[in-house]
Image (cartoon, rainbow, N blue to C red):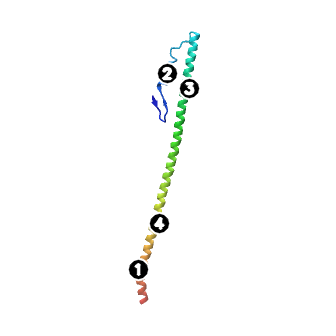
Amino acid sequence: TNTLGLDAEVTADETAAAATTLAGLGVDTVAGANFAMARIDSALTAVNGLRGNLGAIQNRFESTIVNLQTVSENLSASRGRIQDADFAAETAALTKAQILQQAGVSVLSQANAQPQLALSLLQ
């Protein structure tokens, strides 16, 4: 038995049974020919049933493939959004740090200018 997953199963016994029912058929007589035709019809019915099962299994695989491709595309898009969001947050943090640094430099330069202003007033 070869299990294909997705709750689908095709057995080698089914295909072998269809083949062995045709072995040794004779068409020498009318009865033998009628019997052979009945066996051939039965084998064709079995083969058609197996083909239907295999077609259904193939459709399930194709559906699963499409679903997995969609999941993969969605994951890629999500990863991109997460990376973009992190980049934006880091850019905002850098801008904030630069503004704070510039404000600090400005405060220090004003503090250094105060004593010189007082000296210039005294002169």
Q: Residue furthest top?
A: 29
The residue tagged 4 is 95
Which of label 4 and label 1 is nearer to you?
A: 4
Label pair 2/4, CB-CB below 8 angstroms: no
Q: Quadrant of the C terminus?
A: bottom left
Q: Secondary structure at mark 4?
A: helix
Mark number for residue 17? 2
Is tag 4's residue or tag 1's residue first in the polypeptide sequence? 4
What amino acid does circle 2 point to? Ala
Is tag 2's residue or tag 4's residue first in the polypeptide sequence? 2
Q: Secondary structure at mark 1?
A: helix
Which of label 3 and label 1 is nearer to you?
A: 3
Q: Secondary structure at mark 2?
A: helix
Relative to 119, does residue 74 appear above or below in the rendering?
A: above
The residue tagged 1 is 112
Front residue of 118/123: it is: 118
What amino acid does circle 3 point to? Asn
Mark number for residue 48? 3
Is tag 3's residue or tag 1's residue first in the polypeptide sequence? 3
What amino acid does circle 1 point to? Asn
